[in-house]
Amino acid sequence: MAGGLLQLVAYGAQDIYLTGNPQITFFKIVYRRHTNFSMESILQTISGNSQLNSKNNVNGSVIVSRNGDLLHKVYVMSDTIGIMDGLDIINEVEIEIGGQLIDRHTKEWNQIWSELTLPESKVLGYKNMIGTMNHGLNQTGLYGVNMVQIPIHFWFCRNPGLSLPLIALQYHEVQLNFTFGSSVGTTANVDVYCDYFYLDTDERRRFAQVSHEYLIEQLQIQKCNDLSDVKLNLNHPVKEIIWTSDNDYGEAQLKLNGHDRFSKQRQEHFQLRQPYDYHTAIPGYNIPLKDATEFLTTPIDTNIRKNIYAGAIDDQDIYNTGGTYRAMWLSIHIDSMDQLVEKVVSIHTTYIRYSSTSLQEDIPFRIGDIINIVITPGTINDDIPYQMVSMHRVNNIIDNVIHFQPSIPNFPQDGLYPRDPDAGGAGLDTTTDLMDNVYVYIIGRLEERKSRCSTLNKKINCYSFSLNPEEHQPSGTCNFSRIDTARLLTTNPLTSEDNIYAINYNILRIMSGMGGLAYSN
Protein backbone atom coordinates (compact mmCIF):
# COMPACT_ATOMS: atom_id res chain seq x y z
CA MET A 1 0.00 0.00 0.00
CA ALA A 2 1.31 3.45 -0.91
CA GLY A 3 2.16 5.76 1.97
CA GLY A 4 -0.44 8.31 0.90
CA LEU A 5 -3.22 5.70 0.93
CA LEU A 6 -2.02 4.46 4.31
CA GLN A 7 -2.47 7.97 5.68
CA LEU A 8 -6.06 8.06 4.40
CA VAL A 9 -7.09 4.83 6.12
CA ALA A 10 -5.28 5.73 9.37
CA TYR A 11 -8.46 7.46 10.58
CA GLY A 12 -9.44 7.57 14.23
CA ALA A 13 -11.89 9.17 16.64
CA GLN A 14 -9.79 12.31 16.98
CA ASP A 15 -9.99 12.96 13.24
CA ILE A 16 -13.75 13.51 13.53
CA TYR A 17 -13.01 16.92 15.13
CA LEU A 18 -10.89 17.87 12.12
CA THR A 19 -12.49 16.32 9.05
CA GLY A 20 -15.88 14.95 10.16
CA ASN A 21 -18.81 16.51 8.28
CA PRO A 22 -16.50 18.67 6.10
CA GLN A 23 -17.63 22.16 5.15
CA ILE A 24 -14.92 23.22 2.68
CA THR A 25 -12.58 21.66 0.16
CA PHE A 26 -9.12 22.90 -0.76
CA PHE A 27 -9.42 21.54 -4.29
CA LYS A 28 -12.29 23.57 -5.75
CA ILE A 29 -11.93 27.31 -5.44
CA VAL A 30 -14.97 29.33 -4.44
CA TYR A 31 -15.43 32.99 -5.30
CA ARG A 32 -18.20 35.55 -5.00
CA ARG A 33 -19.37 37.97 -7.65
CA HIS A 34 -19.12 41.68 -6.80
CA THR A 35 -21.03 44.77 -7.81
CA ASN A 36 -19.79 46.65 -10.84
CA PHE A 37 -17.61 49.70 -10.13
CA SER A 38 -14.65 51.71 -11.39
CA MET A 39 -11.93 53.92 -9.86
CA GLU A 40 -10.27 57.19 -10.80
CA SER A 41 -7.81 59.63 -9.20
CA ILE A 42 -8.72 63.31 -9.69
CA LEU A 43 -6.81 66.51 -8.92
CA GLN A 44 -8.49 68.81 -6.37
CA THR A 45 -8.59 72.60 -6.16
CA ILE A 46 -6.75 74.07 -3.15
CA SER A 47 -8.17 77.26 -1.64
CA GLY A 48 -5.75 79.49 0.22
CA ASN A 49 -2.08 78.61 -0.14
CA SER A 50 -0.92 75.78 -2.36
CA GLN A 51 2.72 76.90 -2.33
CA LEU A 52 5.04 75.84 0.46
CA ASN A 53 6.84 78.52 2.46
CA SER A 54 10.36 77.84 3.69
CA LYS A 55 9.93 80.24 6.64
CA ASN A 56 6.33 79.91 7.86
CA ASN A 57 3.57 77.32 7.93
CA VAL A 58 0.80 78.08 5.44
CA ASN A 59 -2.82 76.94 5.35
CA GLY A 60 -4.79 75.52 2.46
CA SER A 61 -8.14 73.77 2.21
CA VAL A 62 -9.84 71.46 -0.25
CA ILE A 63 -13.59 71.14 -0.66
CA VAL A 64 -13.72 67.63 -2.09
CA SER A 65 -15.29 67.76 -5.54
CA ARG A 66 -18.25 65.52 -6.29
CA ASN A 67 -16.67 63.85 -9.29
CA GLY A 68 -17.35 60.36 -7.98
CA ASP A 69 -19.77 58.49 -5.75
CA LEU A 70 -17.43 57.37 -2.95
CA LEU A 71 -14.23 58.99 -1.63
CA HIS A 72 -11.36 56.63 -0.85
CA LYS A 73 -7.64 57.47 -0.81
CA VAL A 74 -6.15 60.98 -0.55
CA TYR A 75 -2.58 61.86 -1.58
CA VAL A 76 -0.60 65.08 -1.32
CA MET A 77 2.02 65.43 -4.05
CA SER A 78 4.86 67.76 -4.95
CA ASP A 79 7.28 67.59 -7.87
CA THR A 80 10.09 69.51 -6.18
CA ILE A 81 13.65 68.21 -6.15
CA GLY A 82 14.56 70.12 -2.98
CA ILE A 83 12.61 68.11 -0.41
CA MET A 84 14.64 66.29 2.25
CA ASP A 85 11.65 64.66 4.00
CA GLY A 86 8.30 64.58 2.24
CA LEU A 87 6.36 64.16 5.48
CA ASP A 88 7.44 67.71 6.39
CA ILE A 89 4.96 68.91 3.76
CA ILE A 90 1.94 68.13 5.97
CA ASN A 91 2.23 69.59 9.43
CA GLU A 92 -1.44 68.88 10.13
CA VAL A 93 -4.54 67.78 8.23
CA GLU A 94 -8.19 67.84 9.34
CA ILE A 95 -11.38 66.51 7.83
CA GLU A 96 -14.71 68.29 8.29
CA ILE A 97 -18.17 67.17 7.20
CA GLY A 98 -20.76 69.92 7.13
CA GLY A 99 -18.43 72.15 9.15
CA GLN A 100 -18.02 69.58 11.97
CA LEU A 101 -14.48 68.42 12.75
CA ILE A 102 -14.37 64.65 12.41
CA ASP A 103 -10.66 63.79 12.69
CA ARG A 104 -7.22 65.41 12.77
CA HIS A 105 -3.79 63.94 12.00
CA THR A 106 -0.31 65.42 12.45
CA LYS A 107 3.06 64.89 10.80
CA GLU A 108 4.29 62.93 13.82
CA TRP A 109 1.24 60.66 13.72
CA ASN A 110 1.85 59.89 10.04
CA GLN A 111 5.41 58.90 10.98
CA ILE A 112 4.21 56.73 13.88
CA TRP A 113 1.58 54.99 11.76
CA SER A 114 4.03 54.10 9.01
CA GLU A 115 6.63 52.87 11.53
CA LEU A 116 4.11 50.50 13.15
CA THR A 117 2.06 49.28 10.20
CA LEU A 118 4.21 49.29 7.07
CA PRO A 119 5.47 45.80 6.16
CA GLU A 120 9.19 45.50 5.51
CA SER A 121 8.58 44.57 1.88
CA LYS A 122 7.21 48.08 1.22
CA VAL A 123 9.66 50.16 3.28
CA LEU A 124 12.14 50.93 0.50
CA GLY A 125 9.43 51.87 -1.98
CA TYR A 126 7.64 53.98 0.62
CA LYS A 127 10.83 55.88 1.47
CA ASN A 128 11.34 56.63 -2.23
CA MET A 129 7.71 57.66 -2.53
CA ILE A 130 7.77 60.16 0.36
CA GLY A 131 11.36 61.29 -0.18
CA THR A 132 13.19 60.13 2.95
CA MET A 133 15.96 58.06 1.38
CA ASN A 134 19.16 57.89 3.46
CA HIS A 135 17.14 59.00 6.47
CA GLY A 136 16.45 62.39 4.93
CA LEU A 137 20.09 63.18 4.19
CA ASN A 138 19.63 63.49 0.42
CA GLN A 139 17.36 65.79 -1.52
CA THR A 140 14.67 63.89 -3.38
CA GLY A 141 15.69 64.75 -6.93
CA LEU A 142 19.31 63.78 -6.34
CA TYR A 143 18.56 60.04 -6.41
CA GLY A 144 16.15 59.92 -9.32
CA VAL A 145 12.75 60.48 -7.69
CA ASN A 146 11.46 63.92 -8.64
CA MET A 147 8.00 63.68 -7.08
CA VAL A 148 6.96 62.97 -3.50
CA GLN A 149 3.60 61.33 -2.76
CA ILE A 150 2.29 61.52 0.80
CA PRO A 151 -0.67 59.26 1.73
CA ILE A 152 -3.31 60.48 4.21
CA HIS A 153 -4.41 57.89 6.79
CA PHE A 154 -8.01 58.79 7.70
CA TRP A 155 -10.41 55.90 8.32
CA PHE A 156 -11.93 55.97 4.80
CA CYS A 157 -8.46 55.97 3.17
CA ARG A 158 -7.43 52.63 4.66
CA ASN A 159 -10.44 50.45 3.88
CA PRO A 160 -12.58 50.53 0.71
CA GLY A 161 -15.55 49.33 2.78
CA LEU A 162 -15.37 52.60 4.72
CA SER A 163 -15.19 54.88 1.68
CA LEU A 164 -17.05 58.13 2.30
CA PRO A 165 -20.38 58.15 0.37
CA LEU A 166 -20.37 61.59 -1.26
CA ILE A 167 -23.48 60.56 -3.17
CA ALA A 168 -25.36 60.46 0.17
CA LEU A 169 -24.05 63.85 1.37
CA GLN A 170 -26.09 66.10 -0.90
CA TYR A 171 -26.30 68.94 1.64
CA HIS A 172 -22.95 68.67 3.43
CA GLU A 173 -19.54 69.40 1.98
CA VAL A 174 -16.47 67.32 2.80
CA GLN A 175 -13.52 69.61 3.47
CA LEU A 176 -9.82 68.86 4.06
CA ASN A 177 -7.87 71.54 5.93
CA PHE A 178 -4.08 71.43 5.54
CA THR A 179 -1.34 73.15 7.46
CA PHE A 180 1.69 72.87 5.20
CA GLY A 181 5.00 72.80 7.08
CA SER A 182 7.87 75.25 6.71
CA SER A 183 10.65 72.81 7.61
CA VAL A 184 10.41 71.20 4.18
CA GLY A 185 12.93 73.80 2.96
CA THR A 186 11.39 74.68 -0.40
CA THR A 187 8.73 76.92 -1.95
CA ALA A 188 7.32 74.37 -4.37
CA ASN A 189 3.62 73.95 -5.16
CA VAL A 190 1.65 71.01 -3.81
CA ASP A 191 -1.27 69.11 -5.32
CA VAL A 192 -4.01 67.07 -3.66
CA TYR A 193 -5.40 64.02 -5.44
CA CYS A 194 -8.48 62.06 -4.35
CA ASP A 195 -9.34 58.54 -5.46
CA TYR A 196 -13.02 58.00 -6.26
CA PHE A 197 -15.23 54.95 -6.76
CA TYR A 198 -17.96 55.08 -9.41
CA LEU A 199 -20.91 52.77 -8.67
CA ASP A 200 -23.28 51.08 -11.06
CA THR A 201 -26.84 52.40 -11.32
CA ASP A 202 -28.61 50.16 -8.79
CA GLU A 203 -25.98 50.45 -6.08
CA ARG A 204 -25.65 54.19 -6.67
CA ARG A 205 -29.38 54.60 -6.12
CA ARG A 206 -29.26 52.59 -2.89
CA PHE A 207 -26.35 54.65 -1.51
CA ALA A 208 -28.16 57.91 -2.30
CA GLN A 209 -31.52 56.94 -0.79
CA VAL A 210 -30.80 54.97 2.39
CA SER A 211 -29.22 56.17 5.64
CA HIS A 212 -25.76 54.94 6.63
CA GLU A 213 -23.97 54.26 9.89
CA TYR A 214 -20.21 53.78 9.73
CA LEU A 215 -18.00 52.61 12.57
CA ILE A 216 -15.04 54.95 12.15
CA GLU A 217 -11.72 55.49 13.89
CA GLN A 218 -10.61 58.84 15.31
CA LEU A 219 -7.35 60.09 16.79
CA GLN A 220 -7.04 61.92 20.12
CA ILE A 221 -3.81 63.82 20.88
CA GLN A 222 -2.48 65.09 24.20
CA LYS A 223 0.81 66.70 25.29
CA CYS A 224 2.92 65.23 28.11
CA ASN A 225 4.22 68.59 29.45
CA ASP A 226 7.31 67.35 31.33
CA LEU A 227 5.22 65.26 33.73
CA SER A 228 5.71 61.81 35.21
CA ASP A 229 2.00 61.68 36.16
CA VAL A 230 -0.09 62.57 33.11
CA LYS A 231 -3.86 62.81 33.44
CA LEU A 232 -5.40 61.34 30.31
CA ASN A 233 -8.29 63.41 28.95
CA LEU A 234 -9.65 60.72 26.67
CA ASN A 235 -13.15 59.80 25.50
CA HIS A 236 -14.96 57.04 23.64
CA PRO A 237 -13.98 53.35 23.35
CA VAL A 238 -10.20 53.41 22.89
CA LYS A 239 -8.46 50.44 21.33
CA GLU A 240 -4.85 51.55 21.76
CA ILE A 241 -2.75 54.20 23.52
CA ILE A 242 0.52 55.25 21.88
CA TRP A 243 3.03 57.74 23.25
CA THR A 244 6.39 59.02 22.09
CA SER A 245 9.45 59.38 24.33
CA ASP A 246 12.61 61.38 23.78
CA ASN A 247 14.38 60.01 26.85
CA ASP A 248 14.47 56.88 29.00
CA TYR A 249 11.48 57.05 31.32
CA GLY A 250 12.24 53.81 33.18
CA GLU A 251 8.91 52.15 34.00
CA ALA A 252 5.31 53.01 33.15
CA GLN A 253 1.88 52.03 34.40
CA LEU A 254 -1.72 53.00 33.67
CA LYS A 255 -4.18 53.71 36.49
CA LEU A 256 -7.95 53.80 35.90
CA ASN A 257 -10.01 55.32 38.73
CA GLY A 258 -7.02 54.76 41.02
CA HIS A 259 -6.66 51.07 40.15
CA ASP A 260 -3.82 49.52 38.18
CA ARG A 261 -4.83 48.70 34.61
CA PHE A 262 -1.47 46.97 34.37
CA SER A 263 1.39 46.75 36.83
CA LYS A 264 4.60 48.67 36.30
CA GLN A 265 6.50 47.52 33.24
CA ARG A 266 9.89 48.48 31.93
CA GLN A 267 9.89 50.72 28.86
CA GLU A 268 11.09 47.83 26.68
CA HIS A 269 7.70 46.18 27.26
CA PHE A 270 5.97 49.05 25.43
CA GLN A 271 8.70 49.64 22.85
CA LEU A 272 9.46 46.06 21.82
CA ARG A 273 6.97 43.48 23.11
CA GLN A 274 3.74 45.38 22.49
CA PRO A 275 4.62 46.27 18.85
CA TYR A 276 5.85 42.69 18.37
CA ASP A 277 2.56 41.24 19.66
CA TYR A 278 0.07 43.65 18.10
CA HIS A 279 1.59 45.42 15.09
CA THR A 280 3.10 44.64 11.71
CA ALA A 281 6.53 45.99 12.64
CA ILE A 282 8.61 47.22 15.55
CA PRO A 283 9.55 50.89 15.04
CA GLY A 284 13.17 51.19 14.01
CA TYR A 285 14.09 53.80 16.62
CA ASN A 286 12.88 51.43 19.37
CA ILE A 287 15.68 49.01 18.51
CA PRO A 288 18.88 50.14 20.27
CA LEU A 289 21.23 48.34 17.90
CA LYS A 290 20.74 46.65 14.55
CA ASP A 291 22.36 43.31 13.83
CA ALA A 292 24.13 44.58 10.74
CA THR A 293 27.38 46.41 10.19
CA GLU A 294 27.55 49.54 8.08
CA PHE A 295 30.88 50.57 6.62
CA LEU A 296 31.57 54.16 7.56
CA THR A 297 31.95 56.82 4.89
CA THR A 298 34.67 58.42 7.01
CA PRO A 299 36.71 55.97 9.15
CA ILE A 300 37.17 56.89 12.80
CA ASP A 301 40.83 57.50 13.65
CA THR A 302 41.54 56.16 17.15
CA ASN A 303 44.73 58.26 17.36
CA ILE A 304 47.04 55.30 17.91
CA ARG A 305 50.25 56.22 16.12
CA LYS A 306 53.48 54.50 17.03
CA ASN A 307 55.71 52.38 19.26
CA ILE A 308 54.53 48.81 18.87
CA TYR A 309 57.15 46.27 19.78
CA ALA A 310 56.69 43.53 17.23
CA GLY A 311 57.75 39.95 16.85
CA ALA A 312 56.33 37.07 18.88
CA ILE A 313 55.33 39.47 21.64
CA ASP A 314 52.47 40.39 23.95
CA ASP A 315 51.42 43.38 26.06
CA GLN A 316 53.72 46.05 24.69
CA ASP A 317 53.18 49.79 24.93
CA ILE A 318 51.45 51.91 22.35
CA TYR A 319 51.60 55.65 22.90
CA ASN A 320 49.48 58.26 21.20
CA THR A 321 51.45 61.21 19.89
CA GLY A 322 48.39 63.47 19.89
CA GLY A 323 47.77 63.09 23.59
CA THR A 324 44.05 62.44 23.15
CA TYR A 325 44.13 58.95 24.61
CA ARG A 326 46.14 57.37 27.36
CA ALA A 327 48.77 54.68 27.12
CA MET A 328 47.47 51.45 25.57
CA TRP A 329 48.79 47.98 25.03
CA LEU A 330 48.20 46.09 21.82
CA SER A 331 48.66 42.34 21.96
CA ILE A 332 50.06 41.07 18.64
CA HIS A 333 51.37 37.71 17.57
CA ILE A 334 52.99 37.16 14.17
CA ASP A 335 52.71 33.49 13.26
CA SER A 336 55.80 32.91 11.19
CA MET A 337 58.81 34.97 10.25
CA ASP A 338 59.11 32.82 7.13
CA GLN A 339 55.85 34.30 5.84
CA LEU A 340 57.43 37.72 5.68
CA VAL A 341 59.89 36.46 3.08
CA GLU A 342 56.87 35.25 1.07
CA LYS A 343 55.45 38.79 1.20
CA VAL A 344 52.48 37.75 3.42
CA VAL A 345 52.41 38.26 7.16
CA SER A 346 49.49 36.94 9.22
CA ILE A 347 48.83 39.10 12.26
CA HIS A 348 46.47 38.01 15.04
CA THR A 349 45.47 40.91 17.25
CA THR A 350 43.65 39.75 20.35
CA TYR A 351 43.04 42.86 22.43
CA ILE A 352 43.83 46.46 23.25
CA ARG A 353 44.10 47.36 26.92
CA TYR A 354 43.88 50.91 28.21
CA SER A 355 46.11 51.77 31.14
CA SER A 356 43.30 53.58 32.99
CA THR A 357 39.62 52.75 33.52
CA SER A 358 38.75 56.12 35.02
CA LEU A 359 38.44 57.69 31.57
CA GLN A 360 36.68 54.75 29.95
CA GLU A 361 34.08 56.99 28.31
CA ASP A 362 36.82 58.20 25.96
CA ILE A 363 37.40 54.73 24.54
CA PRO A 364 36.32 55.03 20.89
CA PHE A 365 35.59 51.33 20.30
CA ARG A 366 32.16 49.66 20.46
CA ILE A 367 31.15 46.01 20.32
CA GLY A 368 30.73 44.96 16.69
CA ASP A 369 33.14 47.57 15.32
CA ILE A 370 35.27 46.51 12.37
CA ILE A 371 38.76 47.94 12.71
CA ASN A 372 41.75 48.21 10.44
CA ILE A 373 45.25 48.00 11.87
CA VAL A 374 47.56 49.61 9.33
CA ILE A 375 51.33 49.30 9.60
CA THR A 376 52.99 51.77 7.27
CA PRO A 377 56.65 51.75 6.21
CA GLY A 378 58.61 52.58 9.33
CA THR A 379 61.54 51.51 11.45
CA ILE A 380 61.92 47.84 12.21
CA ASN A 381 65.60 47.65 11.50
CA ASP A 382 64.56 48.98 8.05
CA ASP A 383 63.14 45.54 7.31
CA ILE A 384 59.53 46.39 6.29
CA PRO A 385 59.43 48.98 3.51
CA TYR A 386 55.78 48.37 2.57
CA GLN A 387 52.32 48.85 4.10
CA MET A 388 50.36 46.02 5.69
CA VAL A 389 46.69 45.95 6.77
CA SER A 390 44.82 43.69 9.17
CA MET A 391 41.04 43.70 9.69
CA HIS A 392 39.35 42.61 12.93
CA ARG A 393 35.99 42.78 14.72
CA VAL A 394 35.51 43.95 18.32
CA ASN A 395 33.92 41.02 20.14
CA ASN A 396 33.70 42.35 23.68
CA ILE A 397 34.67 45.25 25.91
CA ILE A 398 35.27 44.42 29.56
CA ASP A 399 36.40 47.28 31.78
CA ASN A 400 39.27 48.82 29.83
CA VAL A 401 40.10 45.82 27.62
CA ILE A 402 38.88 45.69 24.02
CA HIS A 403 38.82 42.08 22.78
CA PHE A 404 39.12 41.37 19.06
CA GLN A 405 38.23 38.49 16.84
CA PRO A 406 41.73 37.53 15.60
CA SER A 407 40.74 38.07 11.98
CA ILE A 408 37.54 38.40 9.99
CA PRO A 409 36.84 35.50 7.63
CA ASN A 410 35.81 36.11 4.02
CA PHE A 411 37.52 39.49 3.89
CA PRO A 412 40.31 39.92 1.33
CA GLN A 413 42.26 41.87 3.94
CA ASP A 414 42.38 38.88 6.27
CA GLY A 415 45.92 38.95 7.62
CA LEU A 416 48.59 41.43 6.60
CA TYR A 417 49.37 41.89 2.94
CA PRO A 418 52.30 43.84 1.46
CA ARG A 419 51.33 46.81 -0.67
CA ASP A 420 54.35 46.18 -2.89
CA PRO A 421 54.58 42.51 -3.89
CA ASP A 422 58.21 42.97 -5.01
CA ALA A 423 59.39 44.51 -1.77
CA GLY A 424 61.99 42.62 0.18
CA GLY A 425 62.07 42.01 3.91
CA ALA A 426 63.65 40.01 6.64
CA GLY A 427 62.14 38.21 9.61
CA LEU A 428 61.22 39.93 12.86
CA ASP A 429 63.32 37.84 15.14
CA THR A 430 63.43 39.65 18.47
CA THR A 431 60.94 41.27 20.83
CA THR A 432 63.00 44.44 20.85
CA ASP A 433 62.28 45.41 17.26
CA LEU A 434 60.44 48.72 17.35
CA MET A 435 57.64 49.28 14.83
CA ASP A 436 56.65 52.90 14.20
CA ASN A 437 53.72 54.30 12.21
CA VAL A 438 50.92 52.01 13.34
CA TYR A 439 47.38 53.31 12.69
CA VAL A 440 44.16 51.85 14.09
CA TYR A 441 40.97 52.92 12.29
CA ILE A 442 37.33 52.01 12.95
CA ILE A 443 35.95 51.40 9.45
CA GLY A 444 32.62 49.71 10.24
CA ARG A 445 30.03 50.01 12.98
CA LEU A 446 26.79 48.26 13.84
CA GLU A 447 23.78 50.24 12.68
CA GLU A 448 22.72 52.62 15.40
CA ARG A 449 19.22 53.61 16.47
CA LYS A 450 17.33 54.80 13.39
CA SER A 451 13.68 54.81 12.37
CA ARG A 452 12.56 52.32 9.70
CA CYS A 453 10.73 54.43 7.17
CA SER A 454 10.62 57.98 8.52
CA THR A 455 12.90 60.56 10.12
CA LEU A 456 11.21 60.36 13.55
CA ASN A 457 13.97 60.31 16.17
CA LYS A 458 11.77 59.26 19.07
CA LYS A 459 10.85 55.94 20.63
CA ILE A 460 7.27 54.82 20.03
CA ASN A 461 5.47 53.19 22.98
CA CYS A 462 2.26 51.17 22.64
CA TYR A 463 -0.34 49.69 24.92
CA SER A 464 -3.15 47.89 23.12
CA PHE A 465 -6.57 47.03 24.55
CA SER A 466 -7.29 45.27 21.25
CA LEU A 467 -6.11 41.95 19.90
CA ASN A 468 -5.67 43.40 16.41
CA PRO A 469 -5.44 47.21 16.68
CA GLU A 470 -4.50 47.67 13.01
CA GLU A 471 -7.71 46.02 11.83
CA HIS A 472 -11.04 47.82 11.59
CA GLN A 473 -12.90 44.88 13.14
CA PRO A 474 -13.17 45.63 16.89
CA SER A 475 -11.30 43.12 19.03
CA GLY A 476 -11.14 44.89 22.40
CA THR A 477 -11.54 48.44 23.73
CA CYS A 478 -11.60 50.44 26.96
CA ASN A 479 -14.43 53.01 27.14
CA PHE A 480 -12.74 56.10 28.56
CA SER A 481 -16.05 58.00 28.51
CA ARG A 482 -16.99 55.84 31.51
CA ILE A 483 -13.68 56.33 33.32
CA ASP A 484 -13.55 59.21 35.81
CA THR A 485 -9.76 59.40 36.16
CA ALA A 486 -7.08 57.86 33.97
CA ARG A 487 -3.38 58.47 34.58
CA LEU A 488 -0.19 57.42 32.83
CA LEU A 489 2.64 57.25 35.36
CA THR A 490 6.33 56.97 34.49
CA THR A 491 9.43 56.75 36.68
CA ASN A 492 11.10 59.65 34.87
CA PRO A 493 9.08 62.52 33.35
CA LEU A 494 8.06 62.49 29.72
CA THR A 495 9.22 65.67 27.99
CA SER A 496 7.18 68.55 26.61
CA GLU A 497 8.04 67.26 23.11
CA ASP A 498 6.38 63.91 23.80
CA ASN A 499 2.76 63.27 22.81
CA ILE A 500 0.10 60.75 23.76
CA TYR A 501 -2.18 59.37 21.05
CA ALA A 502 -5.36 57.33 21.47
CA ILE A 503 -7.23 55.57 18.67
CA ASN A 504 -10.96 55.40 19.41
CA TYR A 505 -14.13 54.23 17.70
CA ASN A 506 -17.11 56.47 16.94
CA ILE A 507 -20.22 56.30 14.77
CA LEU A 508 -20.60 58.47 11.66
CA ARG A 509 -24.28 58.80 10.72
CA ILE A 510 -25.34 59.89 7.24
CA MET A 511 -29.01 60.50 6.54
CA SER A 512 -31.19 62.97 4.65
CA GLY A 513 -28.13 64.22 2.74
CA MET A 514 -26.20 65.23 5.88
CA GLY A 515 -23.54 63.60 8.05
CA GLY A 516 -22.31 63.91 11.62
CA LEU A 517 -20.91 62.08 14.63
CA ALA A 518 -23.23 60.11 16.89
CA TYR A 519 -21.07 60.75 19.98
CA SER A 520 -19.26 63.98 20.78
CA ASN A 521 -16.60 64.67 23.40
Image (tube, rainbow, N blue to C red):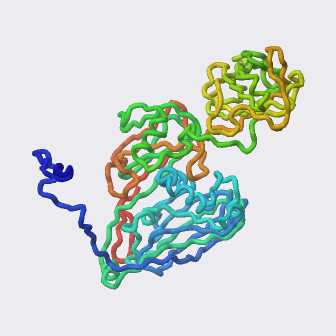
The answer to whether residue 261 is above or below residue 204 is above
Q: Position of residue 409 (x, y in %)?
A: 62, 35
Q: Which of 161/411 is in front?
A: 411
> Which quadrant holds residue 288?
top right
Q: Position of residue 19 (x, y in %)?
A: 16, 53
Would residue 204 appear left or right of 500 to someone viewing this image? left
Would residue 328 appear left or right of 90 to someone viewing this image? right
Q: Residue at x 77, y 19 (%)?
A: 311
Q: Position of residue 420 (x, y in %)?
A: 83, 38
Q: Residue at x 83, y 24 (%)?
A: 426
Would residue 38 appear left or right of 399 to someone viewing this image? left
Instruction: Locate the C terminus by quadrant.
Output: bottom left
Q: Which of 144/175 is in front?
A: 144
The answer to whether residue 449 is above or below residue 328 is below
Q: Position of residue 117 (x, y in %)?
A: 46, 53
Would residue 75 appear left or right of 462 to someone viewing this image? right
Residue 359 can be seen, yes or no: no
Q: Residue furthest bottom?
A: 201
The answer to whether residue 234 is above or below residue 506 is above
> Which quadrant holds residue 218?
bottom left
Q: Residue at x 66, y 67 (%)?
A: 146
Residue 239 can be seen, yes or no: yes
